[in-house]
Amino acid sequence: MMNLRVTLYDVFGYLLPGTVFLASMLVLFWAMCIPQVPLQLITFPIEAWALFFLLAYFCGHAAQALGNILESLLSKLVRRCMILDKILSVDKNALVNGLGEAVKVAAKTSVASLTKINADQITPELLYYLCDEAVAQGGATENCEIFEYREGFYRGMTVSWFLLSISLLIRVFRSDVAVILASGPEPIEGRIFFFVIIASLLTAALFFMRYHLFARHRVEAAIYGFLMLRESKTPQKDG
């Protein structure tokens, strides 16, 4: 029987963002299909919670796929805002974030020497992927994996919280909202919903900032790791 291996990315990259993503889908279903049904707090059996987290895990994959699509579309619309271009472009007029010119030129020169590819033909994306592959082949992947896990977590959370904000906004304009308490149905004022929507949007913005930070760290770790591996393998001259 094949053993199932759960990684940190399964939890932080899929399950946790998928929980918020699934909640946003449930709110959207509530808003579009049964807007007149009041909100009621009920208890669920263990089987229902197990099904919920299983669906949340699959929704986490959907959130990551949607995040990749949005990132690709955004990079095509605003090319100069691409993370890789910001960090790795050797154009002095480009927006440089994190890596100095000397480091980038050294990495490009080393990659060109190793792969026999003309340095002018090495794009920022190719430079990163080749450096990342070299680090992986060298077995020094711990830092890159940590940044990758966190990047995936924040990307998924950005998408999920933004979708939750949209779902709540649609719910507000569909009909009045009520919650069933012990004393009976109580209406929920629209300003409470708008407060939650604003809080959700701010949360999505903060997650996006963290996503951008760890995406930059992941690229930096690959470049620095590649240079250090190359330096350690360079034979030292005597005397």
Image (cartoon, helix red, strand yellow):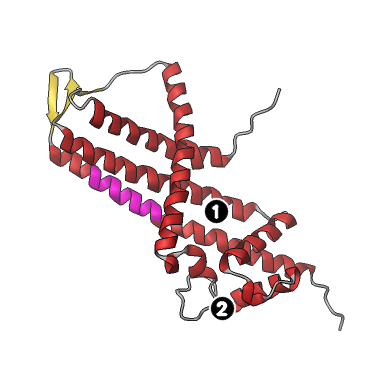
Amino acid carrying label 2: it is Glu
User: Which residue is drawn at the image coordinates 22% and 38% (left, top)?
Assistant: 170
**Residue 169 image offset from top left, x and y in percent:** 22, 41
| Residue 101's disc number | 2
Q: Where is 115 relative to 16, above or below?
A: below
Which secondary structure type mostly characterizes the magenta part of the structure?
A: helix
Label for residue 227?
none
- Left/right of residue 184 with respect to residue 209 in the rendered view: left
| 66 is within the stretch colored magenta | no
Please provide the residue range marked out in magenta: 197-208
**Quadrant housing the N terminus:** top right
Residue 19 locus on image (x, y percent): 41, 34
Residue at image location 63% in from the left, 73% down from the top: 121
Q: Nearer the viewer, residue 118 or 166?
A: 118
Q: Is 161 positioned to the left or the right of 183 in the image?
A: right
Amino acid type of the residue tagged 1 in the rendering:
Phe
Number of numbered callouts drawn: 2
As drawn, is 58 to the left or to the right of 42? Answer: right
In this view of the protein, can residue 149 be seen by the observer?
A: yes
Q: Which image quarter: residue 187?
A: top left
The C terminus sits in image quarter: bottom right
Q: Taking 126 as reference, is 188 above or below it?
A: above
Question: Which residue was labeled with disc 1?
Answer: 147
